[in-house]
Amino acid sequence: MPAQIQRYRSRISGPLLDRIDIHIDAPALSLTELRSEKAGETSAAIRTRAHAARTRQQERFTGTKVTANARMTHAQIRRHCPIDSMLGDLLQQAMEQLCLSARAYDRILKVARTIADLAGRERIEAPHLLEAIQYRSLDRTLFY
């Protein structure tokens, strides 16, 4: 089975993968996790957070044709996704180590902006950027 999965994945081109914003590995839960009595986040809480993030995005793009972070133009990315030099260095290092494309750079910033929106933050912070990078790094470990 792993050989078949690898053969299928190898048929997906890099340019196609670059157009997918988030790649997530969702492994099966362990028995310990299944047996845990710790409650996870409720659907209602997630819905509230997502709605607030979406409202933030709609307000950000008022007066434009853009309605969501994923649709930002290059100029809007520069305006709404500023990162300081420390985060810029971090992103540059990730780009080089993972051999990511210029398209991936913009997509990472868009996803980081959305993660920051979900966290209720005005600016992209290190945890938001690191999470966004993680979503791009999966394609490099699984497909190459």
Image: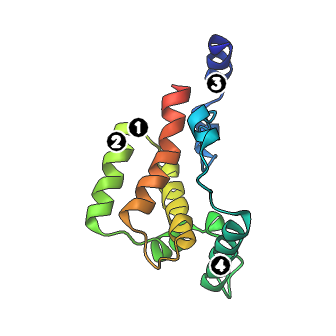
Distance between mark 3 and mark 1 Cα atoms: 18 Å
Callout 2–callout 1 Cβ contact below 8 Å: yes
Does residue 130 show up?
Answer: yes
Mark identifier at residue 108: none
Q: Which residue is mark 4?
A: 52
Of the pair 100 and 115, the residue shown nearer to us: 115
Determine the residue positioned at 54% across, 28% down.
Answer: 142
Q: Nearer the viewer, mark 1 or mark 4?
A: 4
Where is residue 144 shown, x and y percent of the image?
51, 25
Mark identifier at residue 9: 3
Distance between mark 1 and mark 4 Cα atoms: 34 Å
Q: Bin the neighbour count of mark 1 within 10 Å (Cα to Cα): few under 14, some 14-19, many 20 and up.
A: few
Q: Which residue is mark 1?
A: 99
Determine the residue positioned at 36% across, 46% down.
Answer: 94
Is residue 83 positioned above or below 20 on the image? below
Question: Quick one: label 3 or label 4, which is nearer the N terminus?
Answer: 3
Callout 4–callout 2 Cβ contact below 8 Å: no
Distance between mark 2 and mark 1 Cα atoms: 5 Å
Residue 11 falls in image quadrant: top right
Question: Quick one: label 4 or label 2, which is nearer the N terminus?
Answer: 4
Mark identifier at residue 96: 2
Determine the residue positioned at 62% across, 36% down.
Answer: 29
